[in-house]
Amino acid sequence: MAILPGLPGLNVTIVSNGETLPEYSQPDGDDAPQPRTTVCYIESKAGQYFEIRVQFDEDFTHRKYDINVRPTLDGRALTGLVPSRGRLHPVTLASQISFIDGRWVEQNYMFTNLVTVDDQSGQRSGAQDLGKIEVRLHRCEQLDLYPGPSEQKYDLEKKSIAEKALKGKAISHSATLGQPKTIKRPDHVRINWIDTLQHPFATFEFRYRSKRDLETEYIIPRAEEKKGIDRDGFEMVDQPVKSEDRTQTTKRKLSTAGGGPTRSRIKREVETIDLTD
C-alpha cells in the first residue's frame, strides 16, 4: 500500500480483479517526486477494471476537516468524494458519474491498450501524463447539497497519440471508462476549499505499466535475467539482475521540499462532488 511517512494514518491502493496490485519503487534515475507526493509503479492489464481505495485510521492527523478525495487519470481530473470529518471511513472510487444525453450514467475505470500512430495523425499534447493515476487529497468544509448540473461529461475516450510524443518511455496502456450504465441522480455538495486545488496536502501517484513495459524500464527484472542460461541450454548459477527485485510493497519517503500544506482559508467555491458510497 502507498503511504506517506510524514502523514500517518493514510494509505491508498489500486485494486483490480479483486486483488490489490503490488507496488514497485522508482528505479534509479527516475524523476524525483513533488513535495508531499509519493510515487510507485503498478502492473496494468488491458481490458481489466480497477478501483482506488483510500484508508484512514485513528492516527490520521486531519480528522477535524472534511476531506476531498479527487482522482486524476492520465492528467484528466474526475469527480471526487468527500468523506465527512469524524467519520472518515474507507473510500472506494471505481467509476465516473456523468449526465449525458438526458440521463445520469456510471462508467467504471478500466485499463486499455494505447494506440500509437505517426506524428501526422496522432496527438502530441498530454503525453507527459499518460500512464498515471493520481489521487489528490484536500482539506475542505462541506456546505449544502444541490441538484446535479444539467450537463456533466468527462471525456476519457480511447485516443491515438503520436509515438514520438512518448519520448522513448515504455507505455502501452491508457486509462479509460467502461460502458455507461443508467443510474439515479446522485447527490452533489458545495464545499469551501481550505487547501487550494494547486496545493493538496497529499498526492499519491501510481504509474501503471504492462508487465513488458515494467521489464523494459527495469522496474522489475526480465524473465531471462532471473536465471542465467548458457549456449547449450544448461542452467548456470543465478546471475545478478540489472535492478533489485521490487516485487514487495515498499514505503516511500515523503519529500520535505516546499514545507507543509497550505492552511489559509480561501474564498467559497462550488465543486461538484459525488456522495454515492
Image (cartoon, rainbow, N blue to C red):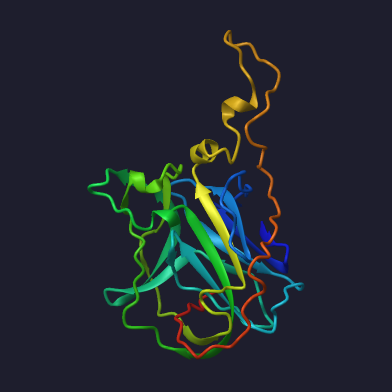
Q: Would you place residue 219 above or below residue 73 in this image?
A: above
32 above or below 27?
Answer: below
Q: Residue at x 65, y 65 (%)?
A: 257
Judged from this view, the residue extending furthest toward the left is 120
Looking at the rendering, which quadrant does residue 215 occupy? top right
- Outermost residue toward the top in this view: 232
Closer-to-camera residue (12/265):
265
- Figure check: 8 above or below 26: below
- Quarter of the picture containing the C terminus is bottom right
Please report the residue visible at 31 percent of the width from the left and 79 percent of the height from the top.
Answer: 151
Percent position (x, y) of residue 276?
51, 76
Residue 203's x, y, as percent? 59, 66
Residue located at (70% from left, 51% from top):
250
Residue 274, position in %: x, y?
48, 77
For this view, does 41 lie left or right of residue 253?
left
x then y, percent, for residue 133: 51, 59
Q: Residue at x 49, y 40 (%)?
A: 213
Instruction: Kindly indicate the quadrant of the structure image that contains residue 56.
Output: bottom right
Left or right, 238 with reference to 178: right
Relative to 177, 228 lies left or right? right
